[in-house]
Image (spheres, rainbow, N blue to C red):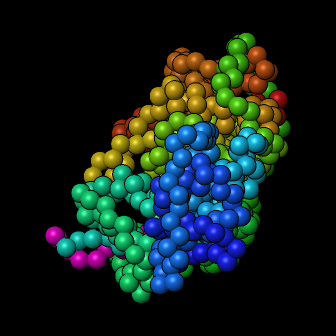
Amino acid sequence: MARTQLSLASHLARLESETDFDGWRDAARRLATNDIPPEEVAWQVGHDDDDRGNDLPACRQDARLVVPREFIERAETVICHSDPERFNFLYRLLWRLRVEPKLPRKLESMEKAVWRDIHKMRAFVRFRKIGDGAEERYVAWFEPDHFIVERNADFFVRRFAGMRWTILTPHASAEWDGKRLAIGPGASKRDAPAEDDAETLWRTYFENIFNPARLKVKAMQKEMPKKYWRNLPEASLIPDLIAGADRAATAMIARMPTSPAPRHAKVKAKHWPSPEPADVVEPESTDIPALREEASGCRRCPLWRDATQTVFGEGPENADVVFVGEQPGDQEDLAGKPFVGPAGKVFDSILDQAEIDRRKVYVTNAVKHFKFEPRGKRRIHSKPNAGEIRACRWWLDKELDIIKPNLAVALGATAAQSLLGKAVPITRMRGDVIQREDGLRVFVTIHPSFILRIREHEDKEAERERFLTDMRKVKQLMAA
Ligand code: URA
Protein backbone atom coordinates (compact mmCIF):
# COMPACT_ATOMS: atom_id res chain seq x y z
CA MET A 1 0.00 0.00 0.00
CA ALA A 2 1.41 3.39 -0.97
CA ARG A 3 -0.12 6.74 -0.23
CA THR A 4 1.23 10.20 -1.02
CA GLN A 5 0.61 13.60 0.60
CA LEU A 6 -2.62 12.44 2.18
CA SER A 7 -2.62 14.94 5.03
CA LEU A 8 -2.61 18.00 2.73
CA ALA A 9 -4.83 16.62 0.03
CA SER A 10 -8.55 16.98 -0.22
CA HIS A 11 -8.97 14.34 -2.91
CA LEU A 12 -7.98 10.73 -2.69
CA ALA A 13 -7.36 8.82 -5.89
CA ARG A 14 -7.34 5.08 -5.28
CA LEU A 15 -5.69 2.61 -7.62
CA GLU A 16 -6.21 -1.14 -7.69
CA SER A 17 -2.55 -2.05 -8.02
CA GLU A 18 0.93 -0.58 -8.41
CA THR A 19 0.54 -0.75 -12.20
CA ASP A 20 -3.14 0.19 -12.51
CA PHE A 21 -2.74 2.48 -15.48
CA ASP A 22 -6.44 2.44 -16.42
CA GLY A 23 -7.26 3.48 -12.85
CA TRP A 24 -4.70 6.28 -12.94
CA ARG A 25 -5.98 7.49 -16.30
CA ASP A 26 -9.59 7.49 -15.16
CA ALA A 27 -8.71 9.36 -11.95
CA ALA A 28 -6.52 11.86 -13.82
CA ARG A 29 -9.33 12.56 -16.28
CA ARG A 30 -11.83 13.18 -13.48
CA LEU A 31 -9.40 15.41 -11.60
CA ALA A 32 -8.24 17.43 -14.58
CA THR A 33 -11.70 18.05 -16.03
CA ASN A 34 -12.77 19.33 -12.61
CA ASP A 35 -9.75 21.63 -12.42
CA ILE A 36 -8.33 19.96 -9.32
CA PRO A 37 -4.63 20.83 -9.04
CA PRO A 38 -2.00 18.17 -8.22
CA GLU A 39 -1.29 19.50 -4.72
CA GLU A 40 -4.87 18.70 -3.72
CA VAL A 41 -4.60 15.03 -4.65
CA ALA A 42 -3.26 12.04 -2.76
CA TRP A 43 -2.71 8.74 -4.55
CA GLN A 44 -3.20 5.42 -2.89
CA VAL A 45 -2.69 1.85 -4.02
CA GLY A 46 -5.20 -0.61 -2.58
CA HIS A 47 -7.68 -0.02 0.22
CA ASP A 48 -7.20 0.27 3.96
CA ASP A 49 -9.35 0.54 7.07
CA ASP A 50 -9.00 4.28 7.53
CA ASP A 51 -10.20 5.00 4.01
CA ARG A 52 -11.71 8.41 3.94
CA GLY A 53 -14.05 7.30 1.18
CA ASN A 54 -13.06 10.37 -0.77
CA ASP A 55 -14.64 9.56 -4.12
CA LEU A 56 -13.48 11.60 -7.05
CA PRO A 57 -15.96 13.78 -8.91
CA ALA A 58 -17.30 12.47 -12.20
CA CYS A 59 -15.63 13.55 -15.40
CA ARG A 60 -17.00 16.87 -16.63
CA GLN A 61 -18.22 16.26 -20.16
CA ASP A 62 -18.18 19.95 -21.04
CA ALA A 63 -14.49 20.32 -20.14
CA ARG A 64 -11.98 19.90 -22.96
CA LEU A 65 -9.00 17.72 -22.14
CA VAL A 66 -6.52 17.02 -24.91
CA VAL A 67 -3.64 14.79 -23.94
CA PRO A 68 -0.92 13.95 -26.49
CA ARG A 69 -0.79 10.27 -27.36
CA GLU A 70 2.97 10.30 -26.74
CA PHE A 71 2.42 11.28 -23.13
CA ILE A 72 -0.10 8.49 -22.58
CA GLU A 73 2.22 5.88 -24.09
CA ARG A 74 5.14 7.02 -21.99
CA ALA A 75 3.08 7.33 -18.84
CA GLU A 76 1.99 3.72 -19.30
CA THR A 77 5.63 2.69 -19.00
CA VAL A 78 6.49 5.12 -16.19
CA ILE A 79 3.63 3.82 -14.07
CA CYS A 80 5.72 0.64 -13.69
CA HIS A 81 8.51 2.63 -11.98
CA SER A 82 9.05 1.88 -8.30
CA ASP A 83 9.08 5.55 -7.25
CA PRO A 84 6.05 5.92 -4.93
CA GLU A 85 5.60 9.50 -6.16
CA ARG A 86 5.10 8.48 -9.79
CA PHE A 87 1.28 8.77 -9.82
CA ASN A 88 1.47 12.28 -8.53
CA PHE A 89 4.40 13.11 -10.82
CA LEU A 90 2.43 11.95 -13.86
CA TYR A 91 -0.60 13.92 -12.84
CA ARG A 92 1.57 17.01 -12.36
CA LEU A 93 2.86 16.53 -15.89
CA LEU A 94 -0.63 16.16 -17.27
CA TRP A 95 -1.59 19.35 -15.49
CA ARG A 96 1.47 21.15 -16.82
CA LEU A 97 0.82 19.97 -20.39
CA ARG A 98 -2.01 22.48 -20.59
CA VAL A 99 0.56 25.27 -20.79
CA GLU A 100 3.89 23.55 -21.50
CA PRO A 101 3.97 20.91 -24.24
CA LYS A 102 7.60 19.90 -23.64
CA LEU A 103 8.01 16.75 -21.56
CA PRO A 104 10.77 16.90 -18.92
CA ARG A 105 13.93 14.78 -18.90
CA LYS A 106 12.85 13.13 -15.69
CA LEU A 107 10.05 11.38 -17.57
CA GLU A 108 12.58 10.09 -20.06
CA SER A 109 14.98 8.85 -17.40
CA MET A 110 12.19 7.06 -15.52
CA GLU A 111 10.99 5.51 -18.75
CA LYS A 112 14.51 4.35 -19.57
CA ALA A 113 14.96 2.85 -16.12
CA VAL A 114 11.79 0.80 -16.59
CA TRP A 115 12.82 -0.37 -20.06
CA ARG A 116 16.27 -1.28 -18.82
CA ASP A 117 14.69 -3.39 -16.12
CA ILE A 118 12.38 -5.03 -18.67
CA HIS A 119 15.37 -5.94 -20.82
CA LYS A 120 17.34 -7.24 -17.86
CA MET A 121 14.44 -9.48 -16.94
CA ARG A 122 14.28 -10.83 -20.50
CA ALA A 123 18.00 -11.52 -20.46
CA PHE A 124 18.46 -12.86 -16.94
CA VAL A 125 15.41 -14.93 -16.12
CA ARG A 126 16.56 -18.57 -15.78
CA PHE A 127 13.93 -21.27 -15.56
CA ARG A 128 14.41 -24.41 -13.49
CA LYS A 129 12.49 -27.54 -14.29
CA ILE A 130 10.22 -29.13 -11.72
CA GLY A 131 8.15 -32.30 -12.25
CA ASP A 132 8.14 -34.67 -15.23
CA GLY A 133 5.76 -35.68 -17.98
CA ALA A 134 2.35 -34.08 -17.54
CA GLU A 135 3.63 -32.38 -14.38
CA GLU A 136 6.56 -30.72 -16.10
CA ARG A 137 6.80 -27.01 -15.35
CA TYR A 138 9.53 -24.40 -15.39
CA VAL A 139 9.89 -21.96 -12.55
CA ALA A 140 12.11 -18.89 -12.30
CA TRP A 141 12.91 -16.43 -9.55
CA PHE A 142 13.71 -12.84 -10.48
CA GLU A 143 14.11 -9.58 -8.53
CA PRO A 144 13.25 -6.61 -10.73
CA ASP A 145 13.82 -3.02 -9.64
CA HIS A 146 10.42 -1.90 -10.89
CA PHE A 147 6.89 -3.24 -11.26
CA ILE A 148 7.45 -4.86 -14.63
CA VAL A 149 6.07 -8.39 -14.34
CA GLU A 150 2.68 -7.69 -15.93
CA ARG A 151 4.30 -5.53 -18.58
CA ASN A 152 6.80 -8.25 -19.51
CA ALA A 153 4.57 -11.30 -19.23
CA ASP A 154 3.39 -11.28 -22.85
CA PHE A 155 6.97 -11.42 -24.00
CA PHE A 156 7.56 -14.63 -22.06
CA VAL A 157 4.27 -16.07 -23.36
CA ARG A 158 5.42 -15.48 -26.93
CA ARG A 159 8.90 -16.76 -26.24
CA PHE A 160 7.95 -19.86 -24.26
CA ALA A 161 4.48 -20.56 -25.61
CA GLY A 162 5.09 -24.33 -25.65
CA MET A 163 6.19 -24.61 -22.00
CA ARG A 164 4.27 -24.34 -18.77
CA TRP A 165 6.09 -21.81 -16.65
CA THR A 166 5.92 -19.52 -13.63
CA ILE A 167 8.00 -16.45 -12.92
CA LEU A 168 8.11 -15.47 -9.27
CA THR A 169 9.16 -12.03 -8.08
CA PRO A 170 8.72 -10.23 -4.75
CA HIS A 171 5.94 -8.06 -6.15
CA ALA A 172 3.99 -10.32 -8.51
CA SER A 173 4.08 -13.66 -10.24
CA ALA A 174 3.17 -14.65 -13.77
CA GLU A 175 2.00 -18.11 -14.67
CA TRP A 176 1.42 -19.64 -18.10
CA ASP A 177 -0.32 -23.01 -18.39
CA GLY A 178 0.04 -23.26 -22.16
CA LYS A 179 -3.28 -21.46 -22.80
CA ARG A 180 -3.82 -18.81 -20.20
CA LEU A 181 -1.69 -16.22 -18.48
CA ALA A 182 -2.41 -15.49 -14.82
CA ILE A 183 -0.86 -12.67 -12.82
CA GLY A 184 -0.74 -13.42 -9.12
CA PRO A 185 0.74 -12.06 -5.90
CA GLY A 186 4.42 -11.78 -5.09
CA ALA A 187 6.45 -14.64 -3.68
CA SER A 188 9.65 -15.30 -1.81
CA LYS A 189 12.83 -16.82 -3.14
CA ARG A 190 12.18 -19.87 -0.98
CA ASP A 191 9.19 -20.67 -3.23
CA ALA A 192 11.49 -21.11 -6.23
CA PRO A 193 13.28 -24.42 -6.86
CA ALA A 194 17.05 -24.73 -6.50
CA GLU A 195 19.44 -26.14 -9.08
CA ASP A 196 18.42 -28.49 -11.95
CA ASP A 197 20.10 -30.15 -14.95
CA ALA A 198 19.69 -27.05 -17.08
CA GLU A 199 22.28 -25.29 -14.90
CA THR A 200 25.09 -27.37 -16.36
CA LEU A 201 23.92 -26.46 -19.84
CA TRP A 202 23.94 -22.77 -19.01
CA ARG A 203 27.42 -23.00 -17.54
CA THR A 204 28.76 -24.77 -20.62
CA TYR A 205 27.13 -22.23 -22.87
CA PHE A 206 28.55 -19.33 -20.90
CA GLU A 207 32.04 -20.83 -20.80
CA ASN A 208 31.86 -21.17 -24.57
CA ILE A 209 30.85 -17.63 -25.33
CA PHE A 210 33.31 -16.18 -22.85
CA ASN A 211 36.24 -14.72 -24.75
CA PRO A 212 39.01 -13.69 -22.34
CA ALA A 213 40.57 -11.32 -24.86
CA ARG A 214 37.38 -9.32 -25.05
CA LEU A 215 36.65 -9.13 -21.37
CA LYS A 216 36.08 -5.70 -19.93
CA VAL A 217 35.09 -6.23 -16.35
CA LYS A 218 33.46 -2.83 -15.88
CA ALA A 219 31.42 -3.09 -19.06
CA MET A 220 30.40 -6.62 -18.21
CA GLN A 221 29.24 -5.63 -14.75
CA LYS A 222 27.28 -2.78 -16.27
CA GLU A 223 25.46 -5.19 -18.59
CA MET A 224 25.11 -7.90 -16.00
CA PRO A 225 25.09 -6.13 -12.62
CA LYS A 226 26.21 -8.19 -9.67
CA LYS A 227 22.70 -8.20 -8.17
CA TYR A 228 21.61 -10.61 -10.93
CA TRP A 229 24.50 -12.99 -10.38
CA ARG A 230 23.00 -14.85 -7.47
CA ASN A 231 20.13 -16.14 -9.61
CA LEU A 232 22.21 -17.07 -12.64
CA PRO A 233 23.67 -20.57 -12.78
CA GLU A 234 26.51 -19.43 -15.01
CA ALA A 235 27.47 -16.67 -12.57
CA SER A 236 29.33 -19.10 -10.34
CA LEU A 237 31.94 -19.23 -13.12
CA ILE A 238 32.43 -15.50 -13.39
CA PRO A 239 35.02 -14.91 -10.63
CA ASP A 240 37.25 -17.71 -11.96
CA LEU A 241 36.82 -16.65 -15.54
CA ILE A 242 37.68 -13.05 -14.70
CA ALA A 243 40.70 -14.14 -12.69
CA GLY A 244 41.94 -16.28 -15.58
CA ALA A 245 41.13 -13.74 -18.26
CA ASP A 246 44.27 -11.64 -17.98
CA ARG A 247 46.47 -14.69 -18.16
CA ALA A 248 44.55 -16.13 -21.09
CA ALA A 249 44.59 -12.85 -22.99
CA THR A 250 48.34 -12.41 -22.48
CA ALA A 251 48.91 -15.94 -23.72
CA MET A 252 46.69 -15.31 -26.70
CA ILE A 253 48.63 -12.18 -27.65
CA ALA A 254 51.93 -14.02 -27.20
CA ARG A 255 50.75 -16.70 -29.64
CA MET A 256 50.03 -14.14 -32.33
CA PRO A 257 52.76 -13.91 -34.95
CA THR A 258 54.08 -10.45 -35.75
CA SER A 259 52.73 -9.20 -39.05
CA PRO A 260 54.78 -8.41 -42.12
CA ALA A 261 54.62 -4.83 -43.45
CA PRO A 262 51.24 -4.46 -45.13
CA ARG A 263 51.18 -4.33 -48.91
CA HIS A 264 48.34 -2.44 -50.40
CA ALA A 265 45.82 -4.77 -51.93
CA LYS A 266 44.84 -4.25 -55.51
CA VAL A 267 41.17 -3.68 -55.48
CA LYS A 268 38.52 -2.53 -57.81
CA ALA A 269 37.26 0.83 -56.60
CA LYS A 270 33.89 1.97 -57.80
CA HIS A 271 31.85 4.95 -56.87
CA TRP A 272 28.62 4.13 -55.22
CA PRO A 273 25.92 6.42 -53.89
CA SER A 274 25.68 6.50 -50.10
CA PRO A 275 22.40 5.10 -48.85
CA GLU A 276 19.63 7.62 -48.42
CA PRO A 277 19.49 8.70 -44.80
CA ALA A 278 16.60 6.98 -43.06
CA ASP A 279 13.54 9.15 -42.60
CA VAL A 280 13.73 9.69 -38.86
CA VAL A 281 14.68 12.21 -36.20
CA GLU A 282 18.38 12.59 -35.48
CA PRO A 283 19.53 11.03 -32.18
CA GLU A 284 21.49 13.13 -29.74
CA SER A 285 24.16 10.62 -28.78
CA THR A 286 27.67 11.37 -29.89
CA ASP A 287 29.50 8.41 -28.44
CA ILE A 288 29.01 4.66 -28.68
CA PRO A 289 28.01 3.96 -25.05
CA ALA A 290 25.30 6.65 -25.23
CA LEU A 291 24.13 5.38 -28.61
CA ARG A 292 24.02 1.81 -27.28
CA GLU A 293 21.92 3.01 -24.36
CA GLU A 294 19.57 4.80 -26.73
CA ALA A 295 19.29 1.74 -28.96
CA SER A 296 18.36 -0.46 -26.00
CA GLY A 297 14.86 1.03 -26.20
CA CYS A 298 14.62 0.96 -30.01
CA ARG A 299 11.12 0.51 -31.41
CA ARG A 300 11.81 1.42 -35.03
CA CYS A 301 10.54 -1.89 -36.31
CA PRO A 302 8.55 -4.69 -34.64
CA LEU A 303 11.53 -7.00 -34.08
CA TRP A 304 12.13 -5.67 -30.55
CA ARG A 305 8.96 -7.34 -29.33
CA ASP A 306 10.18 -10.92 -29.46
CA ALA A 307 13.91 -10.40 -29.08
CA THR A 308 15.52 -10.51 -25.65
CA GLN A 309 17.42 -7.28 -26.12
CA THR A 310 19.08 -4.97 -28.62
CA VAL A 311 22.47 -6.39 -29.55
CA PHE A 312 24.56 -3.34 -30.27
CA GLY A 313 28.02 -3.16 -31.85
CA GLU A 314 31.17 -3.67 -29.81
CA GLY A 315 34.70 -2.43 -30.14
CA PRO A 316 36.83 0.69 -29.79
CA GLU A 317 35.52 4.02 -31.02
CA ASN A 318 38.78 4.66 -32.89
CA ALA A 319 38.69 1.37 -34.80
CA ASP A 320 40.03 1.45 -38.37
CA VAL A 321 37.55 -1.09 -39.55
CA VAL A 322 33.92 -1.89 -38.86
CA PHE A 323 32.69 -5.42 -39.57
CA VAL A 324 28.97 -5.61 -40.25
CA GLY A 325 27.07 -8.89 -39.93
CA GLU A 326 23.41 -9.59 -40.60
CA GLN A 327 21.62 -9.79 -37.25
CA PRO A 328 22.25 -11.42 -33.87
CA GLY A 329 21.55 -15.12 -33.61
CA ASP A 330 20.07 -17.09 -30.73
CA GLN A 331 23.18 -16.92 -28.54
CA GLU A 332 23.92 -13.28 -29.33
CA ASP A 333 20.34 -12.41 -28.40
CA LEU A 334 20.82 -13.99 -24.98
CA ALA A 335 24.33 -12.69 -24.38
CA GLY A 336 23.64 -9.18 -25.72
CA LYS A 337 26.87 -9.30 -27.75
CA PRO A 338 27.50 -9.65 -31.49
CA PHE A 339 29.16 -12.73 -32.98
CA VAL A 340 29.56 -14.89 -29.89
CA GLY A 341 27.71 -17.97 -31.23
CA PRO A 342 28.80 -20.57 -33.82
CA ALA A 343 29.28 -18.05 -36.65
CA GLY A 344 31.22 -15.85 -34.22
CA LYS A 345 33.58 -18.73 -33.45
CA VAL A 346 34.35 -19.22 -37.15
CA PHE A 347 34.76 -15.46 -37.53
CA ASP A 348 37.10 -15.23 -34.51
CA SER A 349 39.32 -18.07 -35.57
CA ILE A 350 39.72 -16.75 -39.14
CA LEU A 351 40.40 -13.21 -37.90
CA ASP A 352 43.03 -14.69 -35.63
CA GLN A 353 44.64 -16.49 -38.56
CA ALA A 354 44.54 -13.32 -40.65
CA GLU A 355 46.25 -11.53 -37.74
CA ILE A 356 43.39 -9.14 -37.19
CA ASP A 357 42.95 -8.43 -33.50
CA ARG A 358 39.23 -8.51 -32.76
CA ARG A 359 39.75 -6.27 -29.74
CA LYS A 360 40.91 -3.51 -32.08
CA VAL A 361 38.05 -3.67 -34.59
CA TYR A 362 34.42 -2.74 -34.23
CA VAL A 363 31.90 -5.54 -34.83
CA THR A 364 28.23 -4.87 -35.35
CA ASN A 365 25.16 -6.01 -37.26
CA ALA A 366 22.93 -4.47 -39.91
CA VAL A 367 19.90 -5.40 -37.80
CA LYS A 368 20.20 -5.21 -34.04
CA HIS A 369 17.39 -7.50 -32.91
CA PHE A 370 17.17 -11.27 -33.39
CA LYS A 371 14.44 -12.24 -35.85
CA PHE A 372 13.27 -15.81 -35.54
CA GLU A 373 10.44 -18.29 -35.94
CA PRO A 374 9.63 -20.33 -32.82
CA ARG A 375 9.83 -24.06 -33.56
CA GLY A 376 8.97 -25.98 -30.39
CA LYS A 377 11.55 -24.87 -27.85
CA ARG A 378 13.95 -23.73 -30.57
CA ARG A 379 14.17 -20.36 -32.27
CA ILE A 380 14.98 -20.61 -35.94
CA HIS A 381 16.79 -17.68 -37.57
CA SER A 382 14.64 -15.75 -40.01
CA LYS A 383 16.06 -13.29 -42.54
CA PRO A 384 15.32 -9.61 -41.92
CA ASN A 385 13.29 -7.93 -44.65
CA ALA A 386 14.11 -4.70 -46.49
CA GLY A 387 11.97 -2.58 -44.13
CA GLU A 388 13.72 -3.95 -41.05
CA ILE A 389 17.13 -3.42 -42.63
CA ARG A 390 16.19 0.14 -43.53
CA ALA A 391 14.77 0.90 -40.08
CA CYS A 392 17.92 -0.34 -38.38
CA ARG A 393 20.29 1.39 -40.76
CA TRP A 394 19.75 4.47 -38.67
CA TRP A 395 21.84 2.91 -35.90
CA LEU A 396 24.49 1.65 -38.27
CA ASP A 397 24.82 5.10 -39.86
CA LYS A 398 25.30 6.58 -36.39
CA GLU A 399 27.90 3.98 -35.44
CA LEU A 400 29.80 4.78 -38.66
CA ASP A 401 29.47 8.53 -38.06
CA ILE A 402 31.04 8.22 -34.63
CA ILE A 403 33.75 5.72 -35.50
CA LYS A 404 34.63 7.11 -38.94
CA PRO A 405 36.40 3.93 -39.99
CA ASN A 406 38.84 3.59 -42.79
CA LEU A 407 36.92 0.60 -44.07
CA ALA A 408 33.62 -1.22 -43.55
CA VAL A 409 33.36 -4.95 -44.21
CA ALA A 410 29.98 -6.25 -45.33
CA LEU A 411 29.65 -9.82 -44.12
CA GLY A 412 26.95 -11.14 -46.44
CA ALA A 413 24.01 -9.80 -48.38
CA THR A 414 22.09 -8.10 -45.57
CA ALA A 415 25.13 -6.13 -44.45
CA ALA A 416 25.93 -5.16 -48.05
CA GLN A 417 22.33 -4.04 -48.59
CA SER A 418 22.47 -1.91 -45.48
CA LEU A 419 25.85 -0.38 -46.20
CA LEU A 420 25.20 0.23 -49.90
CA GLY A 421 21.52 1.05 -49.77
CA LYS A 422 20.46 -1.61 -52.25
CA ALA A 423 20.53 -5.36 -52.75
CA VAL A 424 23.80 -6.55 -54.32
CA PRO A 425 24.89 -9.99 -55.67
CA ILE A 426 27.47 -11.22 -53.16
CA THR A 427 28.97 -13.96 -55.32
CA ARG A 428 29.68 -11.48 -58.10
CA MET A 429 30.89 -8.66 -55.87
CA ARG A 430 32.85 -10.65 -53.33
CA GLY A 431 36.30 -9.15 -52.85
CA ASP A 432 35.30 -5.81 -54.39
CA VAL A 433 35.87 -2.54 -52.62
CA ILE A 434 33.12 -0.08 -53.30
CA GLN A 435 33.51 3.54 -52.45
CA ARG A 436 30.34 5.25 -51.27
CA GLU A 437 29.68 8.87 -52.05
CA ASP A 438 30.54 9.79 -48.50
CA GLY A 439 33.99 8.31 -49.08
CA LEU A 440 33.54 5.18 -46.98
CA ARG A 441 35.08 2.11 -48.59
CA VAL A 442 33.02 -1.05 -48.29
CA PHE A 443 34.61 -4.47 -48.74
CA VAL A 444 32.11 -7.15 -49.69
CA THR A 445 32.41 -10.77 -48.65
CA ILE A 446 30.32 -13.70 -47.47
CA HIS A 447 28.81 -14.18 -44.05
CA PRO A 448 30.83 -16.64 -41.91
CA SER A 449 27.70 -18.73 -41.26
CA PHE A 450 27.85 -19.68 -44.96
CA ILE A 451 30.94 -21.76 -44.10
CA LEU A 452 29.09 -23.45 -41.27
CA ARG A 453 26.30 -24.53 -43.57
CA ILE A 454 28.57 -26.40 -46.02
CA ARG A 455 28.37 -30.14 -45.37
CA GLU A 456 31.24 -31.57 -47.46
CA HIS A 457 34.50 -31.36 -45.54
CA GLU A 458 36.61 -30.42 -48.56
CA ASP A 459 34.20 -27.76 -49.76
CA LYS A 460 34.02 -26.35 -46.26
CA GLU A 461 37.79 -26.14 -46.00
CA ALA A 462 38.02 -24.50 -49.42
CA GLU A 463 35.44 -21.89 -48.45
CA ARG A 464 37.23 -21.28 -45.19
CA GLU A 465 40.45 -20.62 -47.16
CA ARG A 466 38.65 -18.16 -49.42
CA PHE A 467 37.27 -16.32 -46.43
CA LEU A 468 40.75 -16.25 -44.89
CA THR A 469 42.07 -14.74 -48.13
CA ASP A 470 39.33 -12.09 -47.90
CA MET A 471 40.28 -11.30 -44.32
CA ARG A 472 43.96 -10.98 -45.26
CA LYS A 473 42.91 -8.50 -47.91
CA VAL A 474 40.91 -6.63 -45.26
CA LYS A 475 44.02 -6.53 -43.09
CA GLN A 476 45.92 -4.85 -45.90
CA LEU A 477 43.10 -2.44 -46.65
CA MET A 478 42.79 -1.43 -43.00
CA ALA A 479 46.20 0.15 -43.16
CA ALA A 480 45.69 1.71 -46.59
N1 URA B 1 25.33 -13.65 -37.33
C1 URA B 1 25.41 -12.31 -37.49
O1 URA B 1 25.24 -11.79 -38.59
N2 URA B 1 25.66 -11.57 -36.43
C2 URA B 1 25.85 -12.07 -35.24
O2 URA B 1 26.06 -11.30 -34.31
C3 URA B 1 25.78 -13.46 -35.09
C4 URA B 1 25.52 -14.24 -36.16
| 253 vs 416, nearest the viewer | 416
- Give the quadrant of residue 43: bottom right
**Residue 335 horizontal/vertical position (percent):** 54, 58
**Taking 36 as reference, is 431 above or below it?**
above
**Residue 36 horizontal/vertical position (percent):** 65, 56
| 109 vs 431, nearest the viewer | 109
> Which contiguous range is marked in magenta?
123-134
Q: Looking at the figure, which quarter contains the C terminus?
A: top right
Residue farthest bottom in this picture: 190
**Taking 62 as reference, is 388 above or below it?**
above
- Give the quadrant of residue 269: top right
Q: Residue at x 51, y 78 (%)?
A: 51
Q: Residue at x 62, y 20 (%)?
A: 421
Does the segment drawn in magenta span residue 132? Answer: yes
Q: Residue at x 39, y 54 (%)?
A: 154
Q: Residue at x 73, y 40 (%)?
A: 101
Q: Is residue 73 visible?
A: yes
In the displayed structure, does residue 129 sit left or right of residue 390? left
- Give the quadrant of residue 442: top right
**Residue 251 horizontal/vertical position (percent):** 71, 65
